[in-house]
Amino acid sequence: MMRFSSMKLPSASHIALNTRTPLIVRHCIGILEDIHLRGTMGNAVSKAWDKLGHNAVGRWLFSRVICFKAPYFASIRPVFRRLEPGVCEVGFSKRRAVQNHIGTVHAIAICNAAELAGGIVTEVTLPATHRWIPKGMSVEYLRPATTDLVATARCTLPEAIKDQQTLKIAVEISDATGTIVTRALIDMHVSRRGSR
């Protein structure tokens, strides 16, 4: 599983050598690299969102960069809709590639969206002194998912963050009518950087 808090950003010049990488993704990696190298406060993900998340094109670009770093998430073609400390919303369309044999959105596609939203909200909520990795997830399927979906993850930090602890990240997946179709609870192992 990808830990965004420890991700090493490839250089834009390295990516430019790969002709299969779309120009727009190369541009976004350059933005992330620039933000990462210049910034000493916060993390590259939240700074990139601050720069790109103000319009539909920027949100699409941001989503592609995240999927470039963690390619499996690209299978659902997510688009981030909202990102701030404590809250992350990720939408994805119901299309044939994410459907099961009865024509509803497959459970694993829903779990994929839940893990993506849960991981990114943890990343932008934790202080830079800490890192995270998922260690478990429980899922409750409430009704069939028959439309486009939005995963909303919420992260609340305790007043004092310990060197080692588990945070519970709640994720609700809603359909186009706003009805919750799935609930997930992700156990995120959180530790101080440099500790084991």
Image (cartoon, rainbow, N blue to C red):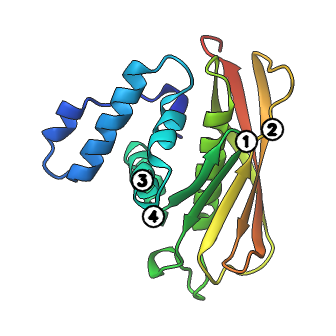
Q: Which mark is residue 58?
A: 3
Which corner quadrant of the image does residue 132 belong to? top right
Instruction: Work out whether 87 lies above or below 96.
Output: above
Quick check: marks 1 and 2 in contact, CB under 8 Å? yes
Q: Position of residue 54 (x, y in %)?
A: 50, 51
Instruction: Work out whether 150 lies above or below 160.
Output: below
Crowding near the residue tagged with mark 3, few <14, some 14–19, many ≥20 C-alpha atoms within 10 Å: some
What separation in Å lies between label 1 and label 3 (alpha carbons)? 21 Å
Q: Earlier in the sequence, mark 1 or mark 3?
A: 3
Instruction: Check disc 1 and give the amino acid type.
Output: Gly
Furthest toward the bottom, the residue is: 102
What separation in Å lies between label 3 and label 2 (alpha carbons)? 27 Å
Using the rendered image of the protein, determine whether residue 31 is visible from the camera's viewpoint.
yes
Is residue 33 toward the left or the right of residue 126 in the image? Answer: left
Q: How many marks?
A: 4
Q: Which residue is mark 1?
A: 86
Q: Which residue is mark 2?
A: 156
Instruction: Check disc 4 and give the amino acid type.
Output: Arg
Q: Quadrant of the C terminus?
A: top right
Q: Earlier in the sequence, mark 4 or mark 2?
A: 4
